[in-house]
């Protein structure tokens, strides 16, 4: 099996590269390779690019650092160390393992990052060590590593690659498998590490001192231990401590990280309390407070989708309202607007555990859907999992590896259990560079059905069931089935103007968001996910269409759809006239033209991307040479004794300078080029790239628009004359 791990390097990248490049482990260095860098000098090159990134961006936060009180605090990772280990049972060759590692990094990082890969053969199992720079050669921005998400993405890419090479993949939940390797029982236990991160993030958003941080940990059932400089965290039923550094790539839950975070929270809390104190006496409502904060202090108060509140300062700093003391919370303020001393009252602290449970309460039940896989979709299958290829709408033909814990049945009748709200990583290998695509499980369910030719059933919606229609979709009500609202996105909704009838696409395996009616036992029911198979009977059980309210409702539906159609037709007519399109062949040529223009923009972006990468690769050496040239000049003007002292003092800078000069040999460039001039060129290239990317977005919109116009023309070809439609409409109303 291939097992992957990744961790951040916050101290010495040089030591990490020296370790992985050990000749005793890599056949005297034969299995060591640097991509966009030379392995022996890679650590210097990483630092050069980081320095140029900091100099160019100026704003420290844009490249991964943090400012608190005017000082840099626990700078983010300088580089990352990735390990990919292969099972001895696979009998993989070192060369094959090395190539799989290269493919993994190309897919994960594209062509934007420097890395050194070394394949170790000193153990029973062959394994790859990869150290890559945290800074992009193209954008000069930092690689964004997200706890769990990044590691899972790497694992899924590695699993697919190893499966394509006929090797085994990393496994989950070993104990869940029976002897045939397919059947499993669903694991109801969550990952301790994931749950710890959720609780610690919750605590870190509220704590204003390290002592308060530890108190909140205790209230949420987290046992903390300290051993030297390291902290450990333990949940109930957890067997071993989890170290602080393994929970965050930037050390958020280390002793120093907690001090920095709580100090920043305390500063923001005091700053915000002072502003509220200043305007509170002039406010009689939340609207007043919002207005006064914006007018007097340029602070924006905004209600979030989850019901919480957030403050935003003019410098961009965002502070959640939960950071404030209890008397400053919105619910308390709403009850005490006319009490001048209300803010200074002492009230009981809130139940932190209850708040956490309410915050983490799922808004929608997650459902597992069992899908049949056709033989055409399955590329390979063994006891470890299956490699699946299918056509995904709007994405093309993609490949995904599904682990054995997701599989049911046997190789002759294979089924896969998919989570509708889980994100799966698929790969598009059709282009020049492999492209990783993350899609929701619900989209994957749709794709599997459509790829097998299992199109959704078109079901008419009873007029009395229509609740409302917006630009997002159709909302209906099904009282007999116990659902107050059921939502269908617009791409699954059509409206027949002739008969004033809505039709929705309903797939048996597809899921639809529904809200049950409130009851005494459950006054605030959470949304549920209905399958199409469960929804169809309720939709098809039509009721008698009686009453004036029904006629009025149908008329309203007709007018809504009519307005939308008129707007669409007017826009289409304007586009056709503006482009002098008078017939279907000219429309087809227009569609082909905009598609060609889109392809041209994509090609220009690809070429400019490569140009920027090459330029920045050279620029970092020139930048470093210019940066340390004064030190070299100074060494030449001092006495031998002083030269010896300065050489010892600036040894690292001298090594950086010599490395840069060495790489600049035989390179064509202007030797008088200054850092300011290079910064100007980089800025111009970035501006051009942004312009092309914006053009790409506009061109994509243009292609979609003309394709929609072409589809509309096709639809209109089969519609009856307008007069006939109106007559039928009046007949239906009278009936």
Image (cartoon, rainbow, N blue to C red):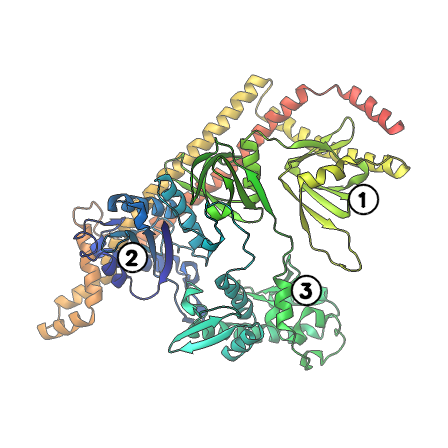
Number of other residues with Cα within 10 Å of mark 3, as a class: few under 14, some 14 to 19, many 20 or more? some
Secondary structure under the numbered disc 2 in the rendered image: helix
Pick whichever, 323 or 545, lies toward us: 545
Q: Which residue is mark 1?
A: 480
Mark 3 and mark 2: Cα distance apart in space: 48 Å
Q: Where is residue 175 shown, x and y percent of the image? A: 47, 55
Please report whichever mark, 3 or 2, sits nearer to the chain's N-terminal start. 2
Q: Nearer the viewer, mark 3 or mark 2?
A: 2
Q: Which residue is mark 2?
A: 46
The image quadrant that residue 444 belongs to is top right
Please report whichever mark, 2 or 1, sits nearer to the chain's N-terminal start. 2
Please report whichever mark, 3 or 1, sits nearer to the chain's N-terminal start. 3
Secondary structure under the numbered disc 3 in the rendered image: helix
Mark 2 and mark 1: Cα distance apart in space: 65 Å
- Lateral position of residue 621 relative to residue 704, left or right: left
Q: At x 45% / y 76%, what residue is drawn?
A: 225
Number of other residues with Cα within 10 Å of mark 2, as a class: few under 14, some 14 to 19, many 20 or more? many
Q: Residue furthest left?
A: 640
Q: Where is residue 629 shown, x and y percent of the image? A: 21, 61
Q: Which residue is mark 3?
A: 291
């Amino acid at each position: 099996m291939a097992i992957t791990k990744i961790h951040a390097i916050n101290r010495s990248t040089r030591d990490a590269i020296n370790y992985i490049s050990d000749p005793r482990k890599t056949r005297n260095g034969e299995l060591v390779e640097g991509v966009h860098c030379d392995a022996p000098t890679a650590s210097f090159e990483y630092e050069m690019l980081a320095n140029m990134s900091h100099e160019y961006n100026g704003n420290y936060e844009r490249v991964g650092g943090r400012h608190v009180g005017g000082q840099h605090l626990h700078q983010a990772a300088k580089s990352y160390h990735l390990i990919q280990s292969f099972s001895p049972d696979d009998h993989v060759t070192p060369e094959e393992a090395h190539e799989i590692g290269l493919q993994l990094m190309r897919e994960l990082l594209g062509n934007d990052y420097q890395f050194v890969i070394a394949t170790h053969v000193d153990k029973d199992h062959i394994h790859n060590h990869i150290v890559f720079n945290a800074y992009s050669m193209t954008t000069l921005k930092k690689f964004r590593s997200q706890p769990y998400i990044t590691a899972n993405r790497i694992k899924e890419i590695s699993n697919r690659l190893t499966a394509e090479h006929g090797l085994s993949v990393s496994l989950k939940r070993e104990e869940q498998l029976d002897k045939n390797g397919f059947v499993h029982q669903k694991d109801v236990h969550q990952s301790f590490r994931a749950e710890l991160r959720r609780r610690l993030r919750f605590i870190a958003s509220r704590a204003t001192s390290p002592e308060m941080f530890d108190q909140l940990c205790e209230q949420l059932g987290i046992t903390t231990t300290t051993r030297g400089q390291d902290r450990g965290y333990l949940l109930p039923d957890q067997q071993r401590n989890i170290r602080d550094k393994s929970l965050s790539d930037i050390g958020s839950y280390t002793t120093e990280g907690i001090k920095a975070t709580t100090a920043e929270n305390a500063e923001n809390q005091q700053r915000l309390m002072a502003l509220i104190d200043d305007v509170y006496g002039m406010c009689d409502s939340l609207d007043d407070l919002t207005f006064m904060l914006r007018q007097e202090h340029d602070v924006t108060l905004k209600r979030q989708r989850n019901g919480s509140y957030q403050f935003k300062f003019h410098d961009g700093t965002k502070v959640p309202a939960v950071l404030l003391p209890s008397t400053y919370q919105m619910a308390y303020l709403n009850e005490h607007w006319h009490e001048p001393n209300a803010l200074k009252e002492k009230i009981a602290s809130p139940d932190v555990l209850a708040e956490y449970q309410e915050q983490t309460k799922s808004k929608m039940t997650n459902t597992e859907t069992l899908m049949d896989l056709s033989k055409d979709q399955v590329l390979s299958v063994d006891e470890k999992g299956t490699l699946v290829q299918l056509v995904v709408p709007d994405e093309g033909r993609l490949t995904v590896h599904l682990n054995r814990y997701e599989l049911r049945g046997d190789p002759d009748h294979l089924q896969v259990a998919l989570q509708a709200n889980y994100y799966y990583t698929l790969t598009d290998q059709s282009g020049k560079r492999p492209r990783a695509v993350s899609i929701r499980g619900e989209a994957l369910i749709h794709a599997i059905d459509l790829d097998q030719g299992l199109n959704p059933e078109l079901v008419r919606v009873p007029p009395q069931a229509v609740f409302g229609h917006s630009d997002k979709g159709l909302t209906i009500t099904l009282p007999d089935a116990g659902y107050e609202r059921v939502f269908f996105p617009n791409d699954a909704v059509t409206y027949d103007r002739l008969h004033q009838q809505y039709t929705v696409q309903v797939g048996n395996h597809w899921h639809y968001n529904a809200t049950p009616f409130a009851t005494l036992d459950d006054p605030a029911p959470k949304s549920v996910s209905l399958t199409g198979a469960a929804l169809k009977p309720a939709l098809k059980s039509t009721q008698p269409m009686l009453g004036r309210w029904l006629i009025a409702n149908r008329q309203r539906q007709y007018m809504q759809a009519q307005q939308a159609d008129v707007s669409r037709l007017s826009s289409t007519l304007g586009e056709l006239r503006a482009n002098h399109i008078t017939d279907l062949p000219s429309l087809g040529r227009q569609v082909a033209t905009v598609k060609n223009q889109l392809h041209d923009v994509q090609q220009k972006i690809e070429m400019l991307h490569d140009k920027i990468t090459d330029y920045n690769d050279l620029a970092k050496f020139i930048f470093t040479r210019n940066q340390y040239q004064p030190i070299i000049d100074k060494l030449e003007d001092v006495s031998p004794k002083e030269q010896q002292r300065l050489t010892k003092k600036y040894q690292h800078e001298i090594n950086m300078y010599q490395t840069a000069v060495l790489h600049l040999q035989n390179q064509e460039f202007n030797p008088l080029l200054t850092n300011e001039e290079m910064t100007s060129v980089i800025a111009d290239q970035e501006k051009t790239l942004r312009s092309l990317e914006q053009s790409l977005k506009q061109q994509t919109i243009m292609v979609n628009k003309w394709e929609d116009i072409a589809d509309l023309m096709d639809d209109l070809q089969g519609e009856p004359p307008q007069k006939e439609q109106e007559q039928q409409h009046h007949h239906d109303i009278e009936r």
